[in-house]
Image (cartoon, rainbow, N blue to C red):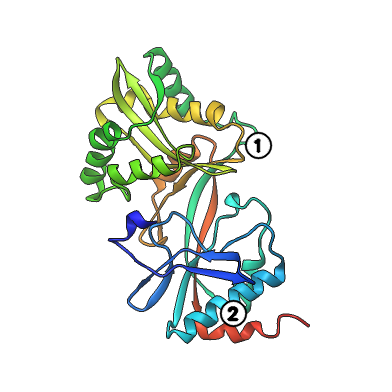
C-alpha cells in the first residue's frame, strides 16, 4: 500500500498471539477517525486461515481496545465481500452485531458465478460479440499498461467524470512488478490499433475487473464484449467468480442504472459491499460473548 503513502496517513494494525501474526487491519486515519484502508477495493479484518472463533473474538476486541486507548473514537470498517473468502468466515458479522455496529453504506457489485450456467449473456451482448468477431477484433494480454491508460482510460475518466484512475501508470507498473500473476491487462485491437481494455486484479477465487474502458468512436465494434467473453469463458473459467465491480454513486445512495444493466447483460448478479461504523468504546460489549 506504500504507493498510496502520499494520499493516506497509514494506521494499519497487526494483532499477534505469542509472536504469531493472526490478524491484520489495513487502515488509514483521517480527521481522527480510522478507516479500513480507503485506497483498497475491499478491506476489513484479514485473518489467518488457521484461526478459531476465540482468536477472532480476541483479535477484534484487542483492536477496538487499542484504538480506544489511543483516543480513536470511531472505526469505519469494510466487510470483506464473501466471494473473496477462501473459507466461510462470518464471525465478523456476529461481532459487528455484538458491538452494535452501524451499517452506514452498502454498495452493489455485479459478479458472474463461474460455477453456474454461463449462457446467460443477453441478446444485445451476443449480437455485439458476433459483430466483434466479424470485424476480426483481436484480444491480447500485455504486460504494459501505458497505451491503454494514456490513450483510453485516463481521457475517458477525465471527460466523463472529471476524475482519474485510482492508480497512475507508474503505480500499476509497480503493482505488476510485485504481483506479476495477479495484475493483468487485456486489450482489444482492430487493425492493430487498441480500441478497448480491461485491467484485472486476480485473487485465488475471484477475477475482478478494476478498470474497464473503450474508445467511444469504436464502441460499436464490440471490443469490450469480446474481451469479457474471452475472460469469462476462457482465461478465468477456473475461478469461482468474475467481478465487474460496483455500480453505485454518492456513497452507495444511488445506482447507476445504465451501468448496472450493462454488467447484468453479461450474466452478472448483484452482491453487496458493506461498510460499518463502530464506536471503539464498545469493545466492552464483547466481554460476555462466552458463557
Q: Earlier in the sequence, mark 1 or mark 2?
A: 2
Left/right of residue 232 with respect to residue 4 in the rendered view: right
The x and y percentages for residue 168 are: 28, 46
Which is nearer the eye, 64 or 198?
64
Specify few, some or many for label 2: CA neighbours under 10 Å numbering under 14, 14-19, or 20 or more. some
Marks 1 and 2 close (CB-CB < 8 Å): no
Residue appearing at x 53%, y 56% in the figure: 272
Measured along the vertical axis of the image, is residue 1 above or below residue 182?
below
Element type where label 2 sits in the image: loop
Viewport quadrant of the N terminus: bottom left
Which is nearer the eye, 284 or 231?
284
Marking on residue 99:
2
Residue appearing at x 50%, y 30% in the figure: 231
Residue annotated with mark 1: 115
The x and y percentages for residue 81 are: 55, 55
For this orientation, the residue located farthest to the right is 291
Specify few, some or many for label 1: CA neighbours under 10 Å numbering under 14, 14-19, or 20 or more. few
Marking on residue 102:
none
Measured along the vertical axis of the image, is residue 178 above or below residue 124?
below
Residue appearing at x 34%, y 41% in the figure: 173
Which is nearer the eye, 260 or 179?
179
Viewport quadrant of the C terminus: bottom right
The x and y percentages for residue 34 are: 42, 73
Element type where label 1 sits in the image: loop
Residue appearing at x 53%, y 79% in the figure: 64
Amino acid at each position: 500500500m506504500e504507493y498510496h503513502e502520499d494520499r493516506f496517513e497509514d494506521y494499519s494494525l497487526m494483532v499477534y498471539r505469542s509472536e504469531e501474526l493472526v490478524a491484520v487491519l489495513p487502515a488509514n486515519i483521517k480527521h481522527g477517525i480510522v478507516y479500513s484502508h480507503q485506497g483498497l477495493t475491499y478491506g476489513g479484518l484479514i485473518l489467518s486461515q488457521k484461526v478459531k472463533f476465540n482468536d477472532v473474538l480476541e483479535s477484534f476486541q484487542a483492536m477496538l481496545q487499542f484504538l480506544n486507548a489511543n483516543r480513536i473514537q470511531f472505526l469505519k470498517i469494510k466487510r470483506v465481500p464473501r466471494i473473496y473468502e477462501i473459507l466461510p468466515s462470518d464471525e465478523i458479522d456476529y461481532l459487528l452485531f455484538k458491538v452494535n455496529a452501524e451499517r452506514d453504506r452498502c454498495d452493489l457489485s455485479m459478479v458472474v458465478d463461474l460455477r453456474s450456467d454461463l449462457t446467460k449473456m443477453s441478446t444485445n451482448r451476443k449480437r455485439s460479440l458476433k459483430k466483434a468477431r466479424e470485424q476480426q477484433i483481436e484480444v491480447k494480454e500485455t504486460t504494459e499498461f501505458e497505451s491503454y491508460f494514456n490513450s483510453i482510460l485516463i481521457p475517458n475518466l477525465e471527460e466523463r467524470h472529471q476524475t482519474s484512475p485510482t492508480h497512475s501508470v507508474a503505480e500499476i507498473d509497480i503493482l505488476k512488478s510485485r504481483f506479476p500473476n495477479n495484475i493483468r491487462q487485456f486489450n482489444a485491437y482492430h487493425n492493430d490499433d487498441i480500441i478497448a481494455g480491461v485491467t484485472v486484479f486476480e485473487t485465488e477465487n475471484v477475477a475482478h475487473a478494476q478498470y474497464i474502458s473503450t474508445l467511444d468512436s469504436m464502441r460499436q465494434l464490440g471490443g469490450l464484449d469480446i474481451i469479457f467473453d474471452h475472460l469469462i469463458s476462457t482465461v478465468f473459467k477456473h475461478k469461482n467468480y468474475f467481478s465487474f465491480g460496483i455500480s453505485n454513486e454518492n456513497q452507495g445512495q444511488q445506482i447507476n442504472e445504465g451501468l448496472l444493466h450493462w454488467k447484468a447483460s453479461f450474466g452478472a448478479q448483484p452482491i453487496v459491499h458493506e461498510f460499518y461504523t463502530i464506536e471503539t468504546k464498545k469493545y466492552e460489549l464483547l466481554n460476555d460473548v462466552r458463557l
